[in-house]
Image (tube, coloured by chain):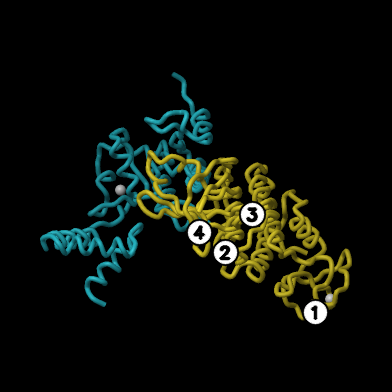
């Protein structure tokens, strides 16, 4: 196998990249300066060598613990539970959240054999238990899918007996959308979750 | 070729790229259908929110013969089934029903299977929590029945003798039903007493939705039956469902 084939085979393993796109990317990398593919290779190597899961919350980090967990200004009495580590970034970018996170590593997926033991559930329950009442609220920010909902329902059953308040992200009309084009299920959710003005 | 429109239940979703998804539907007119939907992901994507697992709707799709993956044009929700995630047994039961439907090898459209899928999902969504174990087992047996495999419970599968009301026999998986006491003397297969056989009959017919005793034992019989007759591979969702069922208390008679 030539090195060109080798690289395009590797690229084609990435989600959404077929063999044709992979080959086009290789050709693009070979056309310009050789510095660009070298920079890409170095960046890939550094990500593979240095990024790992935070020992406490599962977020991406280059250290033992992530920058959220070690920040003394974060409110340790609130833990926001997300499915994937890249969702931490989505919530951080809002600038509205001051608590800590916990990354589950996915959602319950019966057809893929993913049950509670395959997710970072035990470490979440351990964190709440070890805090001895120090965690007042757990926000379940799993996705608004059937699978995300079931995962939240499962976690709620496990966490509530430990004394923490359990909340769920509100579901409703996306910002900037016309009511006319929003589907019935979303409107029903928004109605159920309406708030006093 | 013009697109076709058919009633369809969404069984499974795979993210394909930044903007596309692959959906696996069971449809009324075309049986199992893998469908590519472009531009469905992301915040401005119209319709993506409605495509939650177990939804029923009118699917409009360009079907290319001889292809495994077809192109979605539109999906209009008829029944969102938004409560399926509100209880673990609802979710586990519905997932198992969906996996059995997608695991069978018969690719012909089956309107009875479509109707059974619709009916069992509706029941799983609305049933009260205390009967969800029984409803899950019964839903699975009905789907298995609609696929053309119902266990023989009244007559011995070896000798053809009608089983006595109080007879204790054994379940013969390869033969797909009960053996009478005399034919079960070799001890193969699980022992089934009169009470267990009545419960099993109720689950298969879908008439017994009361709380079920020995739910795990019944799931194990169902799983082995499915392994022998319906699916060519082990179904992970049945294991998932088993972990949700209440543990069996004592050995059944
Ligand atoms: Zn952390
Ligand atoms: Zn016999």
Is the residue marked by circle 3 packed among few (<14), some (14-19), or many (20+) residues within 10 Å? few
Query: Tag 1 or tag 2, which sits nearer the N-term?
Result: 1
Is the residue marked by circle 4 packed among few (<14), some (14-19), or many (20+) residues within 10 Å? few
**Label 4 to label 1: alpha-carbon separation:** 54 Å
Q: Which residue is mark 4?
A: B64
- The image position of residue A167, as x and y in percent, is 45, 36
Q: Which residue is mark 2?
A: B235
Q: Which chain is cyan?
A: A
Residues at marks 4 and 1, common chain? yes
Residue B128 appears in the figure: yes
Residue at 65% x, 48% y: name it. B118
- Closer-to-camera residue (A14/A162): A14
Q: Are marks 2 and 1 in contact (CB under 8 Å)?
A: no
- The image position of residue B72, as x and y in percent, is 48, 50
Query: Tag 2 or tag 3, which sits nearer the N-term?
Result: 2
Is the residue marked by circle 1 packed among few (<14), some (14-19), or many (20+) residues within 10 Å? few
Residue at 67% x, 43% y: name it. B127
Is the residue marked by circle 2 packed among few (<14), some (14-19), or many (20+) residues within 10 Å? many
Q: Nearer the viewer, mark 3 or mark 1?
A: 1
Chain identity of mark 4: B
Q: Nearer the viewer, mark 4 or mark 1?
A: 4
- The label on residue B246 is 3
Query: Tag 4 or tag 3, which sits nearer the N-term?
Result: 4
């Amino acid at each position: 196998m030539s090195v060109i084939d080798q690289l395009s085979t590797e690229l084609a393993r990435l989600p959404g990249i077929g063999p044709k796109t992979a080959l086009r990317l290789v050709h693009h990398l070979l056309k310009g300066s050789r510095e660009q593919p070298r920079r890409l290779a170095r960046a890939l190597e550094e990500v593979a060598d240095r990024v790992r899961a935070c020992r406490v919350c599962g977020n991406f980090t280059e250290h033992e613990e992530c920058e959220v967990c070690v920040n003394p200004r974060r409110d340790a009495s609130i833990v926001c539970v997300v499915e994937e580590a890249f969702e931490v970034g989505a919530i951080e970018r809002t600038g509205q959240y001051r608590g800590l996170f916990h990354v589950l590593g996915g959602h319950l997926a019966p057809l893929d054999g993913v049950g509670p033991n395959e997710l970072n559930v035990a470490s979440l329950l351990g964190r709440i238990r070890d805090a001895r009442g120090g965690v007042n609220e757990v926000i379940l920010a799993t996705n608004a899918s059937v699978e995300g909902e079931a995962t939240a329902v499962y976690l709620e059953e496990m966490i509530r007996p430990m004394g923490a308040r359990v909340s769920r992200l509100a579901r409703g009309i996306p910002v900037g959308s016309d009511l006319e084009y929003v589907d019935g299920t979303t409107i029903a959710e928004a109605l159920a979750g309406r708030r006093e003005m | 070729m013009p697109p076709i429109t058919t009633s369809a239940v969404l069984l499974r979703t795979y993210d394909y790229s930044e903007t596309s998804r692959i959906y696996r539907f069971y449809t009324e007119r075309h049986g199992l259908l893998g469908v590519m939907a472009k531009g469905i992901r992301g915040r401005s994507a119209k319709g993506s929110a409605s495509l939650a697992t177990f939804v029923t709707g009118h699917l409009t799709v360009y079907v290319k013969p001889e292809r495994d993956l077809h192109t979605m044009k539109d999906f209009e929700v008829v029944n969102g089934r938004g409560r399926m995630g509100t209880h673990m047994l609802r979710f586990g039961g519905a997932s198992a029903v969906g996996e059995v439907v997608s695991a069978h090898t018969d690719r012909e459209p089956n309107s009875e299977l479509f109707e059974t899928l619709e009916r069992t999902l509706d029941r799983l969504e609305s049933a009260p929590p205390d009967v969800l174990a029984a409803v899950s087992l019964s839903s699975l047996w009905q789907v298995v029945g609609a696929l053309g495999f119902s266990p023989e419970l009244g007559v011995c599968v070896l000798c053809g003798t009608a089983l006595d009301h109080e007879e204790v026999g054994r379940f013969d998986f390869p033969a797909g039903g009960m053996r009478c006491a005399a034919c079960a003397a070799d001890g193969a297969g699980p022992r089934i007493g009169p009470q267990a056989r009545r419960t099993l009959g109720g689950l298969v017919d879908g008439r017994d939705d009361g709380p079920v005793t020995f739910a795990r034992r019944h799931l194990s019989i169902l799983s082995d039956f499915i392994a022998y007759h319906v699916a060519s591979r082990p179904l992970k969702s049945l294991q998932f469902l088993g972990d949700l069922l209440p543990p069996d208390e004592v050995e059944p008679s």
